[in-house]
Image (cartoon, grey):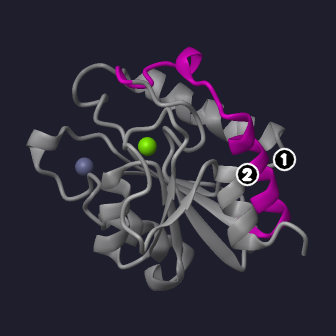
Amino acid sequence: MLAWLSSAKPEYGRFILLDRDGVLNVNRPDYVKTLAEVRFYPDGLEALAFLESRGVGVILVSNQSGINRGLIGWEDFREIHEGLIRRAEESGGRIQAAFYCPHRPDEKCECRKPAPAMIFSACRHAGIDPGETFFVGDSESDMKAAENARCRGVRIYRGDSDGAGPGAPEELHYPTLLDAVFSLYGKNI
Ligand SMILES: [Mg+2]
Ligand SMILES: [Zn+2]
């Protein structure tokens, strides 16, 4: 598991955990391999700004098996990560920490979602209880990870994400990240 923790340490009263590809930026079947391939959803950046304005700290929790598949170089991975942090800040948002799993499924690591390890690490870092924390993802494995960590799964169906449509009724479903955070944190308060 790779962990990046912001050196700035603003005091957030609450935190939200976000998957990356398919939630903040457009996922690619052949993996997001370079910064040039990162295409942010406009609502994703707006959502980050909204969360910052609400005092909600953002922590990314992302599988990046393209690294150990040999498709994403370490330098590119670092550039993508730093580009993400920068774009978030340029848009008025902030990413407080990020946890990545670089492993392939066949490596049987303990961090790859749907395993709960990255969610647990994120919650430990933030000092929050998984049971009172939302984890927003766009895939089945995200929702399984949420379930395995006993945190609250929120699923985004953008139409270009995997999955045919809303599944388990206990999940919260939204068409975009912005819809999700408006609903979870009150647009008009
Ligand atoms: Mg995803
Ligand atoms: Zn892993």
Label 1 neighbour load within 10 Å: few <14, some 14-19, many 20+: some
The single residue placed furthest to the top in the displayed view is 36
Question: Residue at left 28%, top 72%?
Answer: 148
Residue under the point 53% across and 76% down: 133
Judge whether 189 appears above or below 100 on screen. Answer: below
Discs 2, 1 touching: Cβ within 8 Å? yes
**The one of 62 and 154 positioned closer to us in this rendering:** 154
Q: Residue under circle 1?
A: 92
The crowding category of the residue bearing disc 2, from other C-alpha atoms within 10 Å (few below 14, some 14 to 19, many at least 20), is many
Instruction: Name the image quarter holding residue 82.
Output: top right
Number of marks in the rendered image: 2
Quadrant in which the C terminus is drawn: bottom right
Q: Quadrant of ligand 1?
A: top left
* Mark 1: secondary structure: loop
Residue 90 higher or lower than 174, as above or below: above
**Residue 125 visible, this orientation:** yes
Answer left or right for 144 relative to 156.
Answer: left
Kind of residue sitting beneath label 2? Leu
Residue 13 in picture, x, y percent from top left: 72, 80
Element type at mark 2: helix
- Which residue in the protein does label 2 denote? 48
Q: Magenta stretch: give its range.
A: 29-56
How far apart are the alpha carbons under marks 2 and 1? Answer: 7 Å
Q: In the image, residue 146 lies at what x, y percent?
A: 38, 68
The residue depicted at 63 percent of the width and 60 percent of the height is 58
Locate residue 26, reporting x and y percent. Answer: 54, 30
